[in-house]
Image: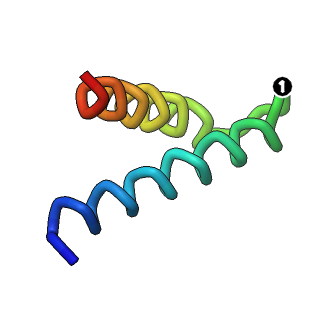
Amino acid sequence: MKKSTDRNIKKAIQLQHTKEKLHEMKHRYNPHKKSLVKALKNLMKREERKNN
């Protein structure tokens, strides 16, 4: 498997897990929530760049 393909798969899984974690948290306070939101935004931007 190509290195880039492996990385794309890992990032897709990471995006899915981040979305699930944030969905579980909903409106509860969590000190890690802010960093999860930033990670989610960055992963979504990466996905958008890859699709264009």
Q: Position of residue 39 (x, y in %)?
A: 43, 37
Left or right: where 26 falls relative to 14: right
Taking the spot 58% from the left edge, 46% from the top edge, the residue there is: 18
* Colour setting: rainbow
Please, what is the three-letter code of the amino acid marked with disc 1?
A: His
The quarter of the rendered structure image containing the C terminus is: top left
Pointer 1 residue? 27
Q: Could you tell me how many numbered marks the image carries?
A: 1
Left or right: where 25 falls relative to 38: right
Left or right: where 23 falls relative to 48: right
Q: Nearer the viewer, residue 10 or 50?
A: 50
The quarter of the rendered structure image containing the N terminus is: bottom left
Say above or below: 38 vs 16: above
Q: Spot the residue most to the bottom.
A: 1
Could you say which quadrant of the image residue 42 lies in? Answer: top left
Taking the spot 53% from the left edge, 30% from the top edge, the residue there is: 37
Q: Position of residue 20 (x, y in %)?
A: 71, 46
Taking the spot 59% from the left edge, 48% from the top edge, the residue there is: 16
Could you say which quadrant of the image residue 41 lies in? Answer: top left
Could you say which quadrant of the image residue 45 lies in? Answer: top left
Taking the spot 30% from the left edge, 29% from the top edge, the residue there is: 51
Could you classify mark 1 by the number of other residues whose Cα lies within 10 Å: few (under 14), some (14-19), or many (20 or more)?
few
For mark 1, give the secondary structure.
Answer: loop
